Amino acid sequence: MTTFLNFLIIVLTIIGIVQIVRIIEIAAKLKGPQDKITTDQDNRYNALAMLIVGLGFTAFVAYSFKLWGHLVLPDPVSVHGEGIKMLWDTTMILILVTFFITQTLLFVFAYKYRGREGNTALFQTHNNKLELLWTSVPAFVLTGLILFGLSTWNKTMVPDTTNAKVMEVYAQQFNWTARYAGDDNQLGKAHYTLIGGINTLGVDERDTLSHDDVVVREIHLVKDQQVLMKFRSQDVIHSAYLPHFNVQMNCVPGMSTQFAFTPTKTTKEMREDPEMIERMKFINEARAKKGEEAVEFDYVLLCNKICGSAHYNMQIKVIVETQEEFDVWMAEQDTFKTLVSAQ
Amino acid sequence: MSDHNEHHHHEETFISKYVFSTDHKMIAKQFLITAMVMGVIAILMSVFFRMQLAWPAEGYPILETFLGKWAPDGVMDPNIYLALVTIHGTIMVFFVLTGGLSGTFFNLLIPLQIGARDMASGFLNMLSYWFFFVSSVVMVISLFVTSGPAAAGWTIYPPLSALPQAMPGSGLGMTLWLVSMSLFIVSALLGGLNYIVTILNLRTEGMSMTRMPLTMWAFLVTAILGVLSFPVLLSAALLLIFDRGFGTAFYLSDIMIQGEMLTQTGGSPILFQHLFWFLGHPEVYIVLLPALGITSEVVSTSSRKPIFGYRAMVGSILAIGFLSFIVWGHHMFMTGMNPFLGSVFTFTTLLIAIPSAVKVFNYLTTLWKGNIQFTPAMLFSIGLVSTFISGGLTGLILGDSALDINVHDTYFVVAHFHIVMGLSAIFGMFAGIYHWFPKMYGKMMNKNLGYVHFWLTFISAYGVFYPMHFIGLAGVPRRYYSNTAFPMFDGLVEINELVTVFAILGAVAQIFFFFNFFYSIYRGKDAPQNPWRSNTLEWTTPTHDRIHGNWPGEIPSVHRWAYDYSKPGADEDFISQVVPLKDGEEEH
């Protein structure tokens, strides 16, 4: 029955449109023959719509930062993230200035130079000076942007890691595991053929470097301590994405990738941040509407490369804390050696 | 080609006229109609997955009607969600915006605008369409296999796409995807070679390269990009077929999946990405350049003004074409590739902003002091310029490797490429259809329905994709079946609903187009020979006796460029390319 009604609605809609078109066409015929491309009336209405919709959209873009600005991630809480933030702000200013100028010109021109009976367009084929200007200005600006971008990129990706604490983040469908390097700050070797039983990461127990490694299901980071994260994957490509820190790196089977960064704010500090309290209030209101309980802020590492059916829920909690808190937590964990011996 | 068209006197059967036609005008229509059918499928899919994102876990009987066991009680399964986004992307990029856009307008316009009786090889052209058709059929068939269609994203990165254990969609669905794409590539290559050869060799007398309309330049560069890059995708697909079926290890290494230890070692999934994006990035311009070419033509004609800076426009098309081959790595900044390589790709990528800026400024100046006729085609062209600016600018963020770190693979990317390449290209395609419909069918499309179609489409297009920037900046990854697994995304419910409402509105708006299109074929007003008072050669052919061979008599020779609009001293505000220069008249 519903199918029939739906079908009926579609048929009636089509008939409706046909009739409207006919009326319009008959009305047009009554006005007499037209050999013009468009009438002045067409041009006037569409030009006006251009002005209203076009400038309306442009204005909305300006307003949207106020309307939706609070949805955007908070400022990055990592040392390199601060550099990226500067590059971001510079780029955004450039983009927005260009956006507002060009969109406004486009819609204003469309309105102002709408066709009118008896009007003639200007015959103008080129203007070398003008064209040189708008080739060289973007070229000049982009040179600056490229240099700024490359220096930020190199600072981010090729940092000095001599004092970094090493850890591994291991991906598989659809969860994450972390491995800490232990006191020696060196990860033991691992190979996929060694995966089995409790040894889910395929760590090589014959490699003595692995003995003090610690395998856990939660990532703990120390504030102001650089961490060198190494990534591996067991099955397909995943991507370790830590949005709050401006960190992302793919985890590729058969390959080892890495990203070094320094968190600058503990989870506790974030939770006490007034701006974050506001955000969490907003989020918890939304959760209450869905009938879900309130939550506190937490950092998270999530998968950002399509990896299968539960891709949308592949996450691991990240906690940033002080060195003392970290040490207490670490002391509670079993080393890899204890783990396999107990087996 | 000055001999009279021999085909004209042949007795044409239904099969030779409508099915296995070698007439470029008929082949263009075949491409267009096929792409429209595929487009409807892809639009429906996008409405379905947008419903899932806005109202997750809510049951909709319509989903069960269409998706069957993949949506028990109307609630979508995660696997079919991924399949829908995959096939939506594949169809839109390849079947609508490559096959549909290039196939339609290259075939229709190349012989007509350069003054040729047909393509260099009508037979290859026919083959090109039929490969495209079979490829479309295979893609559609893949929607009905038990394990579901391909679901690894339109970029089909292995190992996900290589291993049937990884997801249901990597079974038979993926095989059919690869078969379909291989056929598609054959079609693109046959078409592409033909386009290049035709433009280079069959121009009529007087049609020098620098007198060609910008559509021809854009189409020529596009065809060259396609011929140089599609074979690379074919090889990538072949290697993937070997990895899937014959135990090779081009892309596979050290994998343990679903408890099964694979024996392949030594391959690299990153190799696939290099091969894929070596096509994938030029592909963006294969989609975009024809739209820009069409727009150049429509903007100039409808402003009754010469296109501003013809040589700069040609130069920027060539520059964009060249640069598009050396930027593919910006899709792979986060793969762990050498940071130095990332620097190189950042450099080349941001350079593309220069020719793009030149094009935008030239469009703006073409409008300046024009006498703008707001035809539906012109509205879509102005829409294209707007979306090209909006989407192009966010490219400065994504192309800058340092900034890409935090927005890579998020909704920010989805917003960016849909605006700059999806919307721009589809707007260009609509502009082309409205503009050349009289040439295709000898009838006019209804103007007022065209206006309604444009305004609804334009508003809903920005309504869908502009808010997505914010969803991306909130950190939401693309290809997430739902945002509900993370408290940090719980504040995005309303903005997601807004996007979906506009998506549905945008889809409904297309009814006006489809209705107008088919209604006008049968009931439209008869088109005059040159309805837009345009200069280009296609408007010198007869409107109603659309013969195979295009011109009943001699092919006209060309005496001027295509942009003599509102030239001082002329009787009318346009001068066809076939009109000789007057005594003392300067060529633009």
Image (cartoon, coloured by chain):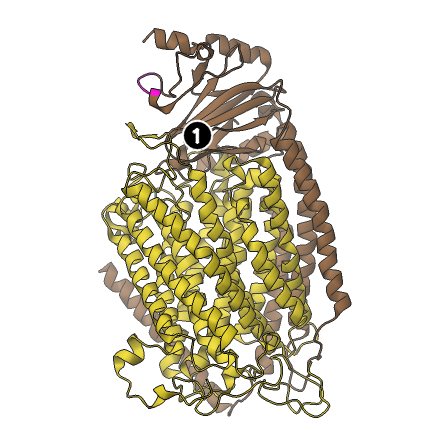
Q: Residue furthest right?
A: A129
- Looking at the picture, does residue A302 appear above or below residue B32? above
Q: Position of residue B130 (x, y in %)?
A: 32, 67
**In the displayed structure image, the side of residue B468 where residue B144 appears, left or right:** left
Report in which chain the residue with disc 1 lies: A
Q: Colour of chain B?
A: yellow
Q: Secondary structure at mark 1?
A: strand
Q: Is residue B173 magenta?
A: no
The reply to whether residue B460 is visible in this rendering is no
**Residue B386 vs residue B586: left or right?**
left
Query: Which residue is found at the position 49% from the left and 40% from the top?
Result: B476
Residue A180: percent from the left, percent from the top?
49, 17
Q: Which residue is mark 1?
A: A315
Relative to residue A53, is residue B113 depicted above or below?
A: below
Left of A196 or right of it: where is B121?
A: right
What's the amino acid at mark 1?
A: Gln
Q: Where does the C terminus of chain A fall, quadrant-wise?
A: top left
The chief SS type of the magenta part is loop
Q: Is residue B398 above or below residue B302?
A: above
Instruction: Give the camera-side residue of B206 and B474.
Output: B206
In the rendered image of this protein, which colour is used for chain A? brown
Pick the front one: B241 or A331? B241
Disc 1 packing (10 Å; few <14; some 14–19; many ≥20): many
Task: Find residue B288 and report its horizontal and vertical position in percent.
Answer: 52, 61
Residue ID at (34%, 64%): B132
**Image location (x, y in percent) of residue B301:** 59, 78
Front residue of B49/B239: it is B239
Region of the chain picked out in magenta, as a range: A194-198
Residue at 48% x, 69% y is: B196
Instruction: Evaluate whether residue A279 shows in this view.
Output: yes
Count of number-bearing discs? 1
Question: Which quadrant, please, contains the N terminus of chain A?
Answer: bottom left
